[in-house]
Amino acid sequence: MSKLTFTPAVPTLTYERVVQQIEEAILSREIEPGQHLPSERELMVQFSVSRPTIREALRVLQSQGLIASRPGGRSGPEVLAVSPDSLGRSFTTMARIASLSLSELVQFRIVLESSACQLAAALHTEEQVEKMRDAVERMEAEVANGSDSFNRADLDFHAAVWEASHNSLLRICGEAVAGSILNLMNDRMERSGNSTAAMEGAVERDRAIFQAIAAGDALAAGNTARNAIASYFAEYLDEEGARGLCALTGAERPTP
């Protein structure tokens, strides 16, 4: 048996121990979203630490999207529901420091969104189908009015699909990775513009996904979403990234 090698133990900073306890209380639902932590003064007493230590711990928890401070409020910070925003910032940060490439993010989005569409086809309610139908119809109507109103309708469509999947983890991860991709692509998208042809193509793709979901065809819904995303992002990826999309779609290099 080989000899084990350990590295020296690193002392944990006091504020980190405060973070760990509060984080565990939030994640275990001892404190529910919408409830408030004790005031800074009360936390100082309970943890037997200084005000700067408590403030540093609260700053970390706020940066993680777990709490929100309310200046001037009588109670402590509010505990927040899990949000895709903080997860999206993590995806974006990792991508910007080259831990994640655009192609990896796109591949992950394909896996998430195609799965969500399959679940939506099997589990949707009539109300959710109507939300999707309304969003696609608004997308078509807004093509002539410019990208802002069109994009809002497009986001509403995808939000309805995530809702219909009845899987909150898919929704949170899906919205986070979509936002991260958008952040990375903003410059390129601004240069290329959101032309009428591009918007019409998005309407066609979303309508095909909607029709498969409404028909309850999970396989078609998943395949349609997979191919639609791959086709849209093909022009933004290098050859290696495109091969990854092909592996997911089982097709030749997607055509933009």
Image (cartoon, rainbow, N blue to C red):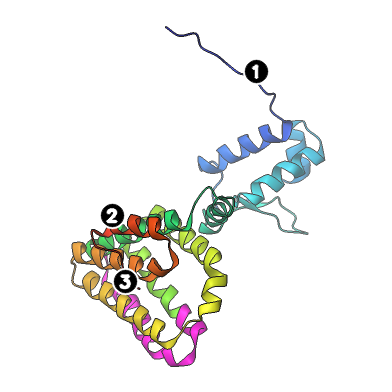
Res. 116 image quadrant: bottom left
Instruction: Answer few, some or many: residues within 10 Å of disc 1's Cα (few below 14, many 20 plus, some between 14 and 19).
Output: few
The range drawn in magenta is 124-151
* Nearer to us in this view, 51 or 154: 154
Q: Secondary structure at mark 2?
A: helix
Q: Identify the mark at residue 247; answer none if there is no mark.
A: 2
Measured as percent of width and height from the top left, residue 44 is found at 77, 37
Q: Between marks 3 and 1, how big is the CA–CA gap?
A: 54 Å
Give the foreground label among 2 and 1: 2
Give the residue displayed 52% in from the left and 42% down from the top.
27
Instruction: Answer few, some or many: residues within 10 Å of disc 2's Cα (few below 14, many 20 plus, some between 14 and 19).
Output: few
Q: Quadrant of the N terminus?
A: top left
Label located before the other in sequence (3 or 1): 1
Measured as percent of width and height from the top left, residue 41 is found at 78, 42
Residue 23 falls inside the magenta stretch: no
- Kind of residue indicated by mark 2: Ala
Judge whether 78 appears above or below 130 on screen. above
Label located before the other in sequence (2 or 1): 1
Q: Secondary structure at mark 3?
A: loop
Judge whether 194 appears above or below 33 on screen. below
Give the residue displayed 73% in from the left and 31% down from the top.
14
Magenta span dominant secondary structure: helix
- Kind of residue indicated by mark 3: Thr
Give the residue displayed 25% in from the left and 61% down from the top.
118
Q: Which residue is mark 3?
A: 255
The answer to whether the residues at label 2 and label 1 have Cβ atoms under 8 Å apart is: no
Q: Which residue is mark 1?
A: 8
* Nearer to us in this view, 43 or 61: 61
